[in-house]
Amino acid sequence: MKLFKIFFILAFILNSFSTSFAEKNDQLTIKISKNLRCVICQGQSIYDSQSEFAVSMKLLIKKKIEQGLSENEIYEFLIDKYGEWIVYDTGFNKNTFILWALPVLLFFLGGAIILKKLVFRKN
Amino acid sequence: MLANHIGHYSLIMGLLTSILIFFLSLKSYKLKIIDKRIFSISFLQLFFVLVSFASLVICFVISDFSNETVFNNSHSNKPILYKISGTWGNHEGSLLLWLLVLVLFLFLFLINSKNELKRYRILTITFQQVIIIGFFLFVLITSNPFNYLFPRPNEGLGLNPILQDPALAIHPPILYVGYVGSSLIFSATLAAVIENYISKDWAKNIKTWILISWIFLTIGIMVGSIWAYYELGWGGFWFWDPVENVSLMPWICLTALLHCVLVLEKRELLKSWTIILSIATFTLSMCGTFLVRSGILNSVHTFANDPSRGLFILCFLFFLITISLIIFFVYNNEKQKNFKKIYFFSKEVSILVNNWFLMYFLSVVFIGTLYPIFLEVLVENKISVGPPFYIKLIVPFLIFFLIFMSIGPNLKWIKETNVKNKIQLIIFFFISLLVSLLIYKNIGETNLINIFLIAASFYLFIVTIRDLFSKESYNFSKKISHFGFSLLILSILLNAILSSEKIINLKVGEKFTFKNEKIFFKSIENNQKENYKSVIGHFTIQDDKNNIFLFKPELRIYDQPLVVTSEADIKTTLLKDKFLVMNAIKGNEYFNVRYQVKPFMIWIWISTLLLAIGGFLSLYKRVHEK
Amino acid sequence: MKNKILIILLLFFLSFCFFVLFKSLQSSSIYVPEKEEDRKLSEFVSEDLFTKKKITSSEIFQGSDYYILNIWASWCAPCREEHPQLMELSKNPSIKLIGLNYKDDPKKAKNFLEKLGNPFSITITDKSGIVSIEFGGYGIPETFLINKDKKIIKTFIGNLTDDSVNQINSIIK
């Protein structure tokens, strides 16, 4: 009886686990497709685009997730095929460090100028 | 035919009057008087451009395909509303509209500035005419809307169907008033710099123009977003697309200017900074025109790519920048003669902080938009800068910005000796932290930055509500706008976090469940409309209380030109939008169905409206006080 | 003095921006995927158009020095135009031609090949469009030249012309 109960609970957990697993895959597909740029309608993401290419791409992403590839592996796979351009989230590398650092540098520069003016005036 | 010629010639006449006014105003400047003829000629100029614009509208309405612009962008069986809005739905027509607004603004300035310094008025006219002449030349040389086609084609090529939409019919004119309004701020600033008139009075006067620009820009961006929400996007309303960024940049800059000019008005501080911001705002508007019109950007909102147009605006843009820089460095001499004390706890410092953050946000958007262009030219490497970049760089700073914004506006000018209600502020802060923790517990996500972001926006929300009902300060317009902003941030945030969706392939008769709702694809209905074929899907959605809603998303197959668009069906309530859209799958009876529940969607629009209403109240008060 | 340096720096910066934007005006903003040379093929499974049997990529790419994979469909007009070029290439014994039938109705596809002649030694189907993405294809028609080591050495976007046939022949020599 106890064994049966445990089995029942286990089955229940496993069951809920598997449905949430499918749900998770769906969410991951959406997340990845939002971060990919469509090569056909070039201003849109794969998620927003309804071109044939985007429809196929969504299927491919799903398949790759089911094959057990991680998010980053899928990006790498697609970058290898289509170039860095296809990913919206440009990582931090030798081509993009200026892109990421410049606004923050400007922020601190601005802060420094404001502080200097304030302190300078006080004296 | 006739309208076409009238339009063309009055455009040329407009250019001639422009040149005339330019020389007359130079002469008046030397003689230190105002030549009365300037007024009448300005009126004439407005008349000519108006006639020119009206004739283009007529060409569109009567579908005169001997006009190249009409031929390229219209079709005889298009509804009348879209024939009219088609006038500015294309490159040539939109530039004519731009020109019209430029001339109109100058005219309004002329009749509203009678009490100002003569030479300042004259110089403003001169600079504005330089801009006007530039655009006249641009329209006439590179993008003449009145090009004549012979033999006359029988039918036009049609307007892109996604542009055939009421929101998009009014979007460009509103946005243009905002954009072009900044040209007057630019001219007036340069004139004031030369005349050494950057002062309290000037700040008071220029603020009217800043407000007008700002209100229209705000509403224009909002209308564009609404359009993107129901027509273009699949439930999104802001894509960080380059063309959208380009409209956001002048808005941020203008917002900074709006605050900065207050300091100038009250304390005669930050003169140079006000000048720089005024110049930057118009430069950004021009820069936006360049980026959009040259086709240099890769965007959803594709426009025809013509390098000669791009080159013209580019040269003109750099000409204006150089001129304004020269004027700025030669004439502006804000010496340290006014040793006014600035205290750290004061309104002016808090406005400075506001400008500091706004400039940071501006630089993020600016660099993100232009970086790919630079990278491609310099290292021949193509990358995409998308939403993740903007979100990652803006969000952490936004948290601090929101906190400053809840404290700063309540500080006094010059020096705040005693920050009131300290305890209340602290209690508010803990309440909002608690609320954000609660929200996050319910969703089950644990992202530290998001918790703080919600807390900060909630904090600002509580504080602005308190201010809204407090009777201490009389500045109601500010309170409304600030409340609108806090509501905007909060609803965008909650919308982003709480949205949920399901994408599925369905055929007629199938159903699926999403959370506790049952969605059933009942049937399909085919109709032939005026200029498109429509396929309407009938869906029922049954929620857990057994209420049944009918959804009718539509597919439109336009034949001129052949384009398929999806019209989402959206049921809006105060708490959430339900969004259902479908799309055909090639060679298949299945439809790709996307169902989204988007909470607080309507509050995004309401809050943006509140922002604009605040601006409008302030404008009303200013005009009334005069 | 300080101002002068600032002005010079600003002017320098401005002309730099002008130069970059000017340069960028000359080139198209539309992105064409940069195809790296010598990309290795990824593994995939597909279905034969005629026998409807499952077939893996390693089975397809064996027994020849060079392979040409052509993405086509009966509904695509340029595919019709490039057909003579494909027929000509099929006469070359050192190339194995593989057709990738993209999102097509099998009946129409077979009809197409019966009418115009079948240049392919194997025709595989790609109903969902996934296989074509595995190759890095994005338009149709698109043609890949693949060598013995299963590396893509050349990609032709759009329909093949006589010129591209000559290019292929010169690479193979």
Image (cartoon, rainbow, N blue to C red):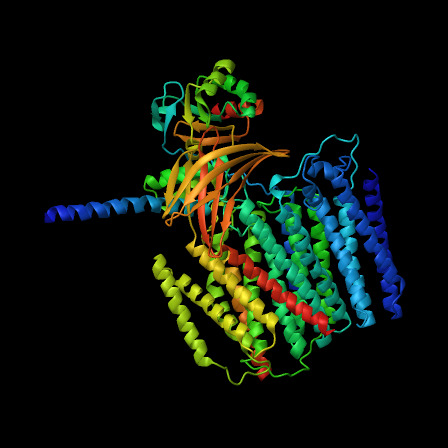
- What is the residue that sits farthest to the left in this orientation? A1
Name the residue nearer the viewer: B491 or B409.
B491
Q: Is residue C89 left or right of residue A21?
A: right
Q: How many labels does the image show?
A: 0
Q: Can residue B253 be seen in this view?
A: yes
Rendered view: B44 above or below B231: below
**Quadrant into which the C terminus of chain B falls:** bottom right
Q: Residue at x 58, y 67 (%)?
A: B481
Q: Which residue is drawn at 62% across and 57% down?
A: B219
Q: Residue at x 45, y 42 (%)?
A: B594
Residue B465 horizontal/vertical position (percent):
51, 70
Residue B131 horizontal/vertical position (percent):
76, 57
Q: Is residue B383 left or right of residue C48?
A: right
Residue B572 horizontal/vertical position (percent):
50, 52
Name the residue nearer the viewer: B325 or C127.
C127
Q: Is residue B277 left or right of residue A2?
A: right
Rendered view: B396 above or below C113: below
Name the residue nearer the viewer: B477 or B43.
B477
